[in-house]
Image (spheres, rainbow, N blue to C red):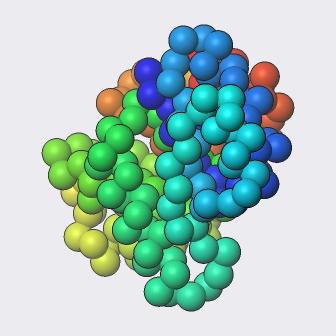
């Protein structure tokens, strides 16, 4: 299984995701780091991990966000990962669902977020790109009433986009693997 570990900056990838990537590799899977280029990626690359850099922007600039969006869309199309594990703001994570639908024109996408505001922004993006018939936005509190949980979701689709932040790397590995 190919897992893309996506985060904004090299500091976070080096200090927070590297232990998770080691665990994924130890279980026989390919872990690929995705973030903006930075000096701390040298240590991660030295351990033999592949890093794909994208121009992630910690800015409200629409131009900067568009470049990052386009780069992530192209990366998803090129890599065709089994799992995308996002470690970003939740609205950015739901944006990955829009990117996935744009990169894979033959798939449908289910995306969830705990923030009603992020889901509202996602709805705007889904509508803007005409993806209403291919992206279902799910409120996890409502979905849980119907048995829709992270555990039930794993392995159900061709590609999964998850955010399970707030857990230790070992807890995240237990959910992912």
Say which of 16 and 40 sits in front: 40
Q: Tell me where residue 138 appears, x and y as whole percent.
A: 48, 50
Say which of 99 and 18 sits in front: 18
Q: Is residue 113 visible?
A: no
Say which of 15 and 106 sits in front: 15
Q: Is residue 43 left or right of residue 62?
A: right
Q: Tell me where residue 167 appears, x and y as whole percent.
A: 80, 35
Q: Tell me where residue 53 appears, x and y as whole percent.
A: 53, 56
At 23% from the left and 70% from the top, the residue drawn is 130
Q: Is residue 68 visible?
A: yes
* Residue 87 vertical placement versus 124 (above, below): above
* Residue 175 vertical placement versus 51 (above, below): above
Q: Which quadrant of the figure contains the C terminus?
A: top right
At 27% from the left and 59% from the top, the residue drawn is 102
At 52% from the left and 81% from the top, the residue drawn is 64
Q: Quadrant of residue 99?
A: bottom left
* Residue 21 vertical placement versus 162 (above, below): above
At 35% from the left and 41% from the top, the residue drawn is 79
Q: Quadrant of residue 18?
A: top right
Q: Which quadrant of the figure contains the N terminus?
A: top left
């Amino acid at each position: 299984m190919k897992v893309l570990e996506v985060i904004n900056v090299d500091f976070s990838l080096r200090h927070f995701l590297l232990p998770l990537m080691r665990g994924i590799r130890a279980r026989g899977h390919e872990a690929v780091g995705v973030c903006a280029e930075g000096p701390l990626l040298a240590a991660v690359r030295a351990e033999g991990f592949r890093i794909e850099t994208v121009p992630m922007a910690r800015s409200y600039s629409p131009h900067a966000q568009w470049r990052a969006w386009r780069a992530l869309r192209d990366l998803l199309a090129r890599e065709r990962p089994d799992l995308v594990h996002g470690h970003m703001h939740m609205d950015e994570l739901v944006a990955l669902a829009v990117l996935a639908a744009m990169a894979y024109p033959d798939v449908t996408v289910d995306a969830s977020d705990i923030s009603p505001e992020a889901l509202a922004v996602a709805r705007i993006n889904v509508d803007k790109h005409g993806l209403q018939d291919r992206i279902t936005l799910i409120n996890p509190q409502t979905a849980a009433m119907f048995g829709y949980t992270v555990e039930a979701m794993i392995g159900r689709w061709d590609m999964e986009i998850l955010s399970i932040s707030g857990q230790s790397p070992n807890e995240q590995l237990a959910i992912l693997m």
